Amino acid sequence: MAAADAIAPAVVAVARRAHFVAALVVHVVDAIYARAGIDPKDARSCPLPTGFLFELGAVIQLVMWESAGLAVHVEAGLPSADSAGKDLERRAKLGPSEFADVTRLELWQKVNLVWVQHFGWQGEESFGAEIALVLADDDLLVDALAEFVWTNRNKLRTDIDEDAQS
């Protein structure tokens, strides 16, 4: 298998996730404009910096995870949604230059790395929800599987016997 073939699913998953988060950002920004009474035509004349929108997407993801009762991002060293939101607000008040260098969007990059490492890549598409993955020790997983098989060893035989008698 070529390296490109192994990487392709990750690229597709990240692109799909970016599209999903971009749609969330659009909805949030539209809601903010509507609540502030800003006409959509006026909003187009004063666009938000791209970097700000990326970072807003990261904050929205943190809010979603925390609303679902997940704390994987905090365990991975990321800030809480509240803390990240306050930092985004502080930076926004400093002006568009804070978001000019889109290669330095640390929160966005870190949130996406946590998503790639700790969430099912097909969760939203397949189930309409985030699917958090638990990383387990291989030995613990093998022991748990062996215990499950041993505990249920007679169940399979019983089911086969019942099917044979039917």
Image (cartoon, rainbow, N blue to C red):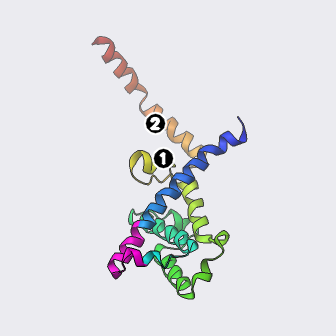
- Foreground: 112 or 47? 47
Residue 77, by quadrant, is bottom right
Which residue does the numbered mark 1 point to in the structure image?
A: 122
Crowding at dot 1, Cα within 10 Å, few <14 / some 14-19 / many 20+, comes out as some
The residue at the point 34 percent across, 22 percent down is 159
* Alpha carbon distance from label 1 to label 2: 27 Å
Find residue 100 and report its horizontal and vertical position in percent: 63, 77
- Foreground: 106 or 82? 106
Crowding at dot 2, Cα within 10 Å, few <14 / some 14-19 / many 20+, comes out as few
Badge 1 marks a residue whose secondary structure is loop
Q: Amino acid at mark 2?
A: Phe
Figure quadrant of the C terminus: top left
The residue at the point 47 percent across, 67 percent down is 62
Relative height, residue 1 to residue 113 (above, below): above
Find residue 23 and report its horizontal and vertical position in percent: 44, 61
Q: Which residue occupies the extreme right position in the image?
A: 2
The residue at the point 66 percent across, 74 percent down is 101
Q: Is residue 133 left or right of residue 162?
A: right
- Residue 135 visible: no
Q: Amino acid at mark 1?
A: Gln
Badge 2 marks a residue whose secondary structure is helix
- Foreground: 153 or 92? 92
Relative height, residue 68 to residue 52 (above, below): above
Residue 114, by quadrant, is bottom right
Q: Is residue 109 magenta?
A: no
Which residue does the numbered mark 2 point to in the structure image?
A: 148
* Magenta stretch bounds: 27-42
